Image (spheres, rainbow, N blue to C red):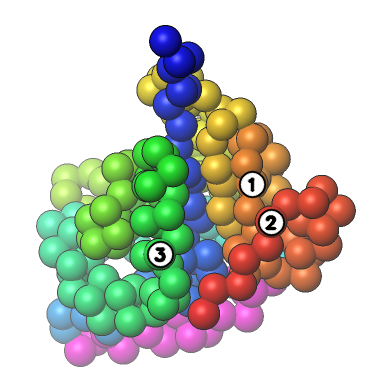
Amino acid sequence: MPPKVPAKAAFFDVDGTLVRTNIVHVYAYYAMNRGSLRGIAGRTLGTALGLPVFGILDAVNRKAFNEFFYRYYSGLSEDRLVTIAEDMFEDVLKPALYEQTQDLIDEARRSGCRIVLVTGALDFTMRPLARHLGCDDVIANKMQFVGGKATGKVIPPIIEGANKANAIRAYCEREGLALNQCHGYSDSASDYAMLAVVGRPTAVNPDLRLRSLARAYNWPILDLK
């Protein structure tokens, strides 16, 4: 009787890996659909003015960037955030999917992998995308809500950097998956820990630093269109 093949998963980063957008584009959509003209103008202007700060923080400290950026959600209704997520997927994320994204997901599925998104985005913004791609699970940041309103704070631990690796390790332990048989896909060197923790890492549309790391470690490199 042949030995049982260990259960495994493919863990995918989202921004830059599967879609061309990032969490700022997603928030901008919410800002433009706030409801009142004053709310739309205020949040759109705030987002525009914050762009230079976003870029600096993202480059220097991804955790600090997430903590700072998600404050912009403060006061928004949980019901509205969840409802708008469906339209946001159709208008923002779906058109930004790389043409080969579904092929990459399907290939991982055919190899026997469970499909899991691992992203610093908010969970409610990722659910429509996960359904569209046929994913099994989503590991993402969770906004804190009080009285049905967003506080602007993310429930720790924030999913970024080393915490992505920790979340993947914990997921595999909980689900009985063989970590050394799992795949990981990302575009950014900030996800080095996530890629290093799995047995089969792949750099997808990598930034310069990740491309250099992938070549040094002989990791596969994919350039999606």
The residue sitting at the top extreme is 1
Q: Which amino acid does label 3 sit on?
A: Asp
Going from N to C along the chain, the mark reached first, 3 or 2, is 3
Can residue 121 be seen here? The reply is no
Query: Label 3, label 2: how many angstroms apart (C-alpha)?
Result: 16 Å
Q: Is residue 217 above or below residue 24?
A: above
Give the residue at x 44% y 49%.
108
Q: How crowded is mark 3: few (under 14 residues within 10 Å), some or many (20 or more)?
A: few
**Residue 29, position as x, y percentages in the image:** 31, 79
Query: Label 1, label 3: how many angstroms apart (C-alpha)?
Result: 17 Å
CB contact under 8 Å: marks 2 and 1: no
Residue 20 is labelled as none
Region of the chain picked out in magenta, as a range: 37-57
Residue 103 is labelled as 3
Can residue 137 be seen here? The reply is yes
**Residue 100, position as x, y percentages in the image:** 44, 72
Which residue lies under the disc numbered 2? 220
Type of secondary structure dominating the magenta stretch: helix
Give the residue at x 82% y 48%.
217
Q: What residue type is labelled 2?
A: Pro
**In the rendered view of the protein, which quadrant contains the N terminus?**
top left
**Residue 60, position as x, y percentages in the image:** 73, 61
Q: How crowded is mark 1: few (under 14 residues within 10 Å), some or many (20 or more)?
A: many
Asked which secondary structure carries label 2, the reply is: loop
